[in-house]
Image: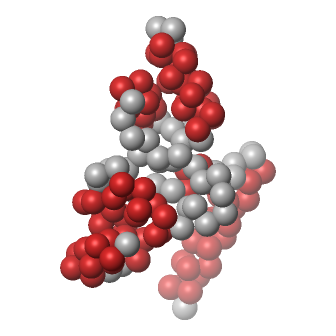
Amino acid sequence: MPTLVIIVIAIIIIAGVIGLALRAGARPSATLAWRTPGFLPPIPEHLQERILELTAEGRGLDAIRLLRQETGLGLREARTITAAIKAGRYTPTTPERPGDGDLAFRVQELKAAGHTDHAIELVRTETGMTRDQAETFVSLI
């Protein structure tokens, strides 16, 4: 019986925290939903172009600030992505056509950019496959 009371109290507390967060305007962000450790999140192409313009003008801090405001990224991630865009390195973009965001398409993008290991880890993370299974999957795409 005491265990049941503890579980009920925990559920009430969790529901209360979620309710307060929703009341304060918190909501999940589709931009931040795609998070895999070691990967750069997708950044819309128009935002990448604006960041490139700002960095070309010597306004790197403004570019980082803009990226953080538009995506909700942390400072470290925003600095890394801004540097990658400025250097012209591969940066994933958000899908512009339906179906572009599926796993196979993202694996193809990573493979085309020479990031086969990242593609394998992406498959493992999203599907729960073993490393061997993911390598086979990636090699067949």
For image coordinates 55% across by 18% down, the residue present is 53
Picture mark count = 0
Say whether residue 87 is visible: yes
The residue sitting at the left extreme is: 132
Tell me which colouring the rendered structure shows: secondary structure
For image coordinates 57% across by 71% down, the residue present is 10
The residue sitting at the top extreme is: 58
Q: Quadrant of the C terminus?
A: bottom left
- Closest to the observer: 97 or 50? 97
- The picture places residue 52, in percent across and down from the top left corner, at 51, 23
Say whether residue 21 is visible: no
Q: Is residue 49 left or right of residue 82?
A: right
- The picture places residue 26, in percent across and down from the top left corner, at 69, 48
The residue sitting at the right extreme is: 23
- Closest to the observer: 40 or 112? 112
- The picture places residue 70, in percent across and down from the top left corner, at 63, 34
Q: Is residue 39 above or below residue 83?
A: below
The residue sitting at the bottom extreme is: 1
Q: Quadrant of the N terminus?
A: bottom right
Q: Is residue 57 above or below residue 64?
A: above
For image coordinates 63% across by 34% down, the residue present is 46
For image coordinates 58% across by 38% down, the residue present is 45
Q: Is residue 117 left or right of residue 21?
A: left
- The picture places residue 71, in percent across and down from the top left corner, at 59, 39
- Closest to the observer: 23 or 54? 54
